[in-house]
Image (tube, rainbow, N blue to C red):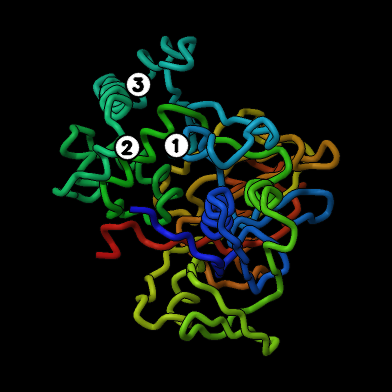
């Protein structure tokens, strides 16, 4: 039995979800129109140019192992720049490095003989890596008995030290919650992606990802500065008084906006953090690694020098530093920035006096499937 394709589809939202949906629909022969209230595509994935730097709206990365990437993106055109597979971990007044020895065999000696983590914990990382590489994505998401990420890690055998210093900081930055209460399936999926690929930054900023998808759509498909105020009986009512009729309407907005247009959709409890950008004459790390803050009584969760990974984020030789906090701070910049700079000086010394604050961003995400019930 054949299914008749809809003559027209309206997609509300020009973020990654809406643009990806539109690209698939256009590919299948549908007539699609995408509406967004913003002045550019990308939704939460936007990049601004400030003082000669590319600033993503909050610290974000792209994992090149994402399974749908090859069908949606021309990865070579994104000029992806990759992080090294590992992390710098600050503990007390010292720092040490934990590398993926499977992809960086030269770090094996240090991994075995460093006393910062027991050898058993390092071997467990390898065991978890092998286990999840052998598990399909379908198998991960079909699990019915779901635990929290923290329970999953403890059941796997990780000790408290590895959880506190590495997983709570690293995944706290991914899930935007340090309690590790996120669905263990989400942990398995993201860990598998890190194990099978690399964390990357596009050379022209994160917004180049949605821009590339939008560029594949027919001219006129995406209508920006077009706020949808109501949906009723297959008709979109726009703020400019225009009415647009479609056979199918796809809501690809954030949860709050979706609720306003369709009250039966629940409003999610957002997780958020503050992200600060600084510029410096030279990099304090000179390594393509994320630096995790293992000191619990601090504002900073992690940082990285963006230009160590992707030099194109700067027009000159200055370094761009991204600092992510453990949680969202509602302090104004005049109060928050000095507190963050004080912690940075504990880490990097007086060189921080030469740094300049560029911008503070809010980064937020919706909860995992487990948290949504």
The image quadrant where one finds the C terminus is bottom left
Q: Are marks 1 and 2 in contact (CB under 8 Å)?
A: yes
User: Which disc is residue 143 wearing?
Assistant: none
User: What residue would you read off at disc 3?
Assistant: 115
Q: Mark 3 or 2, which is nearer the eye?
A: 2
The residue positioned 24% from the left and 46% from the top of the image is: 150
Q: How many marks?
A: 3
Q: Which mark is residue 67?
A: 1
Determine the secondary structure under disc 1.
loop
Of residues 30 and 360, the one nearer the viewer is 30
Name the quadrant containing residue 229: bottom right
Helix, strand or loop for disc 3? loop
The CA distance from mark 1 to mark 2 is 9 Å
Between marks 3 and 1 in the image, the one whose residue lies nearer the viewer: 1
**Residue 129 appears left or right of 208:** left
Measured Cα–Cα span from mark 3 to mark 2 = 35 Å
In this rendering, position of residue 165 left or right of residue 41 = left
**Reading the chain from its start, which is encountered first: label 3 or label 2?**
3
Earlier residue among tags 3 and 1? 1
Q: Residue at x 69, y 68 (%)?
A: 223
Label 2: which secondary element:
helix
Q: Residues within 10 Å of mark 3 (few under 14, many from 20)?
A: few
Residue 46: image quadrant is bottom right
Which residue is label 2 attached to?
137
């Amino acid at each position: 039995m054949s299914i008749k394709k809809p003559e027209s589809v309206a997609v509300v939202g020009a973020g990654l979800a809406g643009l990806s949906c539109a690209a698939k629909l256009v590919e299948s022969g549908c007539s699609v129109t995408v509406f967004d209230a913003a002045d550019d595509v990308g939704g939460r994935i936007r990049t601004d140019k400030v003082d000669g730097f590319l600033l993503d709206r909050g610290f974000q990365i792209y994992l090149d192992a994402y399974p749908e990437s090859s069908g949606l993106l021309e990865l070579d055109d994104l000029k992806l720049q990759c992080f090294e597979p590992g992390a710098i971990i600050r503990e007390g007044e010292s720092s040490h490095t934990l590398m993926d020895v499977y992809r960086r065999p030269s770090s094996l000696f240090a991994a075995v003989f460093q006393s910062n983590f027991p050898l058993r914990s390092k071997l467990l990382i390898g065991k978890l890596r092998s286990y999840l590489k052998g598990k399909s994505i379908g198998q991960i998401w079909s699990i019915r008995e779901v635990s929290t990420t923290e329970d999953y890690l403890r059941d796997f055998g990780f000790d408290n030290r590895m959880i506190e210093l590495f997983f709570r900081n690293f995944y706290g930055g991914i899930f935007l919650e340090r309690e590790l209460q996120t669905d263990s399936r989400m942990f398995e999926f993201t860990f598998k992606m890190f194990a099978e690929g690399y964390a990357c930054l596009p050379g022209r900023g994160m917004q180049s990802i949605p821009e590339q998808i939008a560029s594949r759509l027919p001219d006129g498909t995406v209508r920006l500065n077009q706020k949808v105020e109501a949906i009723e009986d297959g008709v979109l009512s726009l703020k400019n008084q225009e009415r647009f009729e479609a056979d199918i309407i796809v809501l690809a907005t954030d949860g709050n906006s979706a609720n306003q247009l369709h009250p039966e959709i629940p409003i999610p409890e957002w997780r958020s953090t503050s992200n600060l950008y600084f510029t410096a004459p030279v990099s304090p790390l000179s390594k393509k690694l994320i630096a995790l803050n293992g000191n619990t009584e601090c504002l900073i969760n992690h940082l990285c020098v963006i230009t160590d990974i992707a030099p194109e984020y700067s027009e000159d030789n200055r370094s761009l530093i991204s600092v992510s906090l453990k949680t969202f701070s509602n302090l104004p910049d005049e109060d928050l920035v000095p507190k963050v700079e004080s912690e940075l000086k504990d880490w990097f010394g007086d060189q921080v006096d030469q740094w300049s604050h560029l911008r503070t961003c809010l980064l937020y995400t919706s909860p995992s499937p487990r948290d949504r019930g």
